[in-house]
Image (spheres, rainbow, N blue to C red):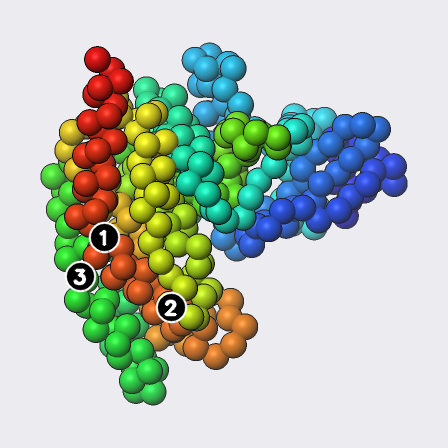
Amino acid sequence: MFQAVLSAYGLRADSCKIEPFGSGLINHTWKVCQEGLAYILQEVNTTVFPKPEYIAHNIRAIKGYLDQTAPDYLFVAPINASNGDDFVVVNDRFYRLFPFIAHSCTIDSVQRPEQAYQAAKQFGQFSRILYAFKAQQLKPTIEDFHNLPLRVRQFKNALAQTSSERMIKASFAIEEIIRYYDIEAQYTQMVKSSELHLRVVHHDTKISNVLLQSETGIGLGVIDLDTVMPGYFISDVGDMMRTYLSEANEEENDFNKIAIRNDVFAAIYKGYMEEMNQVLTLAEKQFFIYSGKFMIYMQAVRFITDFLNGDIYYKTNYPEQNLVRGLNQIDLLNKYVARQQEFEEIISEIDKNQEIVLK
């Protein structure tokens, strides 16, 4: 496989050092080194992304726009094959090659508020520089990716069809999801009233999708652009809230380890709003805290729905893992909601200090 793919880029596999790279769970990724040059080779998971041509279309469109409007922005786009194609297809598998950015690194979890700040600033900058780009030009690489009403309907369908055994085991989680139905109702109202503006958003803002400068930790840019498509800013902010605020991730089964870090929340707000403050409308800004509820709740709904359906979507390593994941996210949501007043005070203090700086 490597020889067939790399030769399409003018490289010889037998003279390259090839090793697995990164911690991504969707696409297979390798680092390829040859004669002092380094690349990232990736196989696209066509189960998750059934239309790779949509990914290529979106990246081409954004790159063309940025080449004209922000040529100095670090946009890590794939290298075209020798024949000009976006992908190399071998045995019905899609591969692409990226340049490896020297003196860069990624991290898998937020250990310090500064890391959250750098990431939030990079995701905010990405949306800001694409503010005038018509998001409708982009194609949906994953249909209904962050469609909360759809996820709630799927939950209701699963609830009606699940076994009595799974319903009993998930009874607390089911009650909690129903108790928070207002999160979905608020989202529906926001979209219906056009309070949220369709923008170019990343949709997968985990910390590992930010390139950092190796020595300083300063953000360089965002990567893993397969999910870039039209959406609402609450997707990007909400996913940062979901994955940055607690040191414990969604696999943790000791819920005592799930704890909200206010300093990380402040870092997310500061970094993101330094870039997006002049872009977001006043109405949108009112939903900054809501964004965390939106994404945490949606992920809880998806895990519990999959458990009720018999674990047919997410991979599991032990029985009831999806139930544990769902309960984990419900615990995170409850702890997040309990901090709302503190979050509002943090935002007010940052905004006040920003006004002083501007004066």
Near-viewer residue (142 or 327): 327
Mark 3 near mark 2, Cβ–Cβ under 8 Å?
no
> Rounded to the nearest whole Å, what is the CA distance between mark 2 and mark 1?
17 Å
Q: Position of residue 77 (x, y in %)?
A: 57, 29
Q: What's the residue type where badge 2 is placed?
A: Phe
Q: Position of residue 302 (x, y in %)?
A: 35, 62
Residue 25 falls left or right of residue 40? left
> Rounded to the nearest whole Å, what is the CA distance between mark 3 and mark 1?
19 Å
In the figure, residue 357 lies in which quadrant?
Answer: top left
Q: Nearer the viewer, mark 3 or mark 1?
A: 1
Q: Position of residue 94 (x, y in %)?
A: 63, 44
Q: Check disc 1 and report its element: helix, strand or loop.
A: loop
Label 3: how many Cα within 10 Å (few below 14, some 14–19, many 20+): few
Kindly identify the residue that appears in the image at 32 percent across and 32 percent down: 270
**Residue 339 shows which numbered tag?**
1
Name the residue that disc number 2 marks: 255
**Residue 181 shows which numbered tag?**
3
Using the rendered image of the protein, determine whether residue 138 is visible from the camera's viewpoint. no
Near-viewer residue (127 or 62): 127
Q: Earlier in the sequence, mark 3 or mark 2?
A: 3
Kindly identify the residue that appears in the image at 15 percent across and 57 percent down: 182
Q: Position of residue 205 (x, y in %)?
A: 43, 42
Kindly identify the residue that appears in the image at 31 percent across and 39 percent down: 266
Q: Check disc 2 and report its element: helix, strand or loop.
A: helix
**Residue 266 shows which numbered tag?**
none
Residue 315 falls left or right of residue 278? right
Q: Nearer the viewer, mark 3 or mark 2?
A: 2
Q: What's the residue type where badge 1 is placed?
A: Arg
